[in-house]
Amino acid sequence: MKPAPFELSQPGTLDDARGLLAAGDADCRIIAGGQSLGPMLNLRLARPDRLVALSALPGLTECRETESHVEIGAAVTHARIEDGDCPEPIPGMLRHVAAGIAYRAVRNRGTIGGSLCHADPAADWVTAMTALGATLLISGEAGTRREVPMRDFMQGAYRTALKPGEILTTVRIPRYSAGARWGYYKICRKVGEFADAISAFVADPETRVCRVVFGSTGGAPLERPALARQLAETGAAAPLDEIKKDLLAAQSDLSPVKLQQMAIAHQRSVQEALSHD
């Protein structure tokens, strides 16, 4: 199929983009890489009157770093992160996650901001940024700015904290110490498919941060503090039965197969974290 007719606008500035979204004369949708929205347009699951393209806007394609954090523009592609074109807040994690997203053709076009705003429960960046404790910088009407922690941004499957007319501009990730460890593991039927289960683990003994996060749950990622405490105290993943019990306490509708997959993914993510030099 082909998409229904629409107008494509390519604003030159962020203010112009906000103006188009706030005009109210058409049903507008933002498009960056288009790797999620494109198929929806072709299947006519989405029929906007206008698309507002952001992929070339100044500032949205830049990566910056300070002593305390790394900032990645929302229009930075997965491929650029995979290729090491962006600084790492914790050595190797962003490149590892980016390299596992779909196929290279998708990574060449898809953007980190587009993935987060699409809010697919099986999306890699949704889980990874929750584990890393990222903060999302959002631009609104009249140039207003606000910061939303990643754990509060995704409110359910394909639902986010973005308000009408707002644009995600930057992903800010805190820097971790040299002693920090991370693990990221996902279970897929084959390479390039959406994950059946995702587990991410980040720990930094210097800042006393430890997070265990599960993705591909059907909704927002699950952050499990009890498993993180157990891991910080013992230096090893909990037994499968304990992991499953903790997950069921958070989401009681998980099937036995999903529980098994998520528990295995967690154990393997921890093995990865402990194996990094």
Image (tube, rainbow, N blue to C red):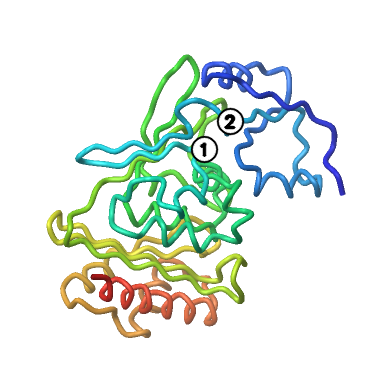
Residue displayed at 19% across by 60% down: 204
Residue displayed at 61% across by 19% down: 22
Above or below: residue 79 compared with residue 201: above
Measuring from the top left, give residue 34's x and y in whole percent.
65, 43
Write down the quadrant of residue 235 in the picture: bottom left
Q: Is residue 218 left or right of residue 138?
A: right
Q: Which residue is mark 2?
A: 54
Q: What secondary structure is marked by label 1?
A: loop
Q: Earlier in the sequence, mark 2 or mark 1?
A: 2
Above or below: residue 65 compared with residue 193: above
Rendered-image quadrant of the C terminus: bottom left
Q: Nearer the viewer, residue 70 or 245?
A: 70
Which residue type does callout 2 highlight? Leu
How busy is the neighbourhood of tag 1: few (under 14 within 10 Å), some, or many (20 plus)?
many
Determine the residue located farthest toward the left in the rendered image: 206
Q: Which residue is mark 1?
A: 75
Measuring from the top left, give residue 63's x and y in whole percent.
39, 38
Above or below: residue 62 compared with residue 83: above
Q: Is residue 46 left or right of residue 233?
A: right
Per the rendering, the mark at residue 260 is none
Alpha-carbon span between mark 2 and mark 1: 7 Å
Write down the quadrant of residue 263 in the picture: bottom left
Check if mark 2's residue and mark 1's residue have beta carbons within 8 Å. Answer: yes
Measuring from the top left, give residue 113's x and y in whole percent.
50, 42
Which residue type does callout 1 highlight? Ala
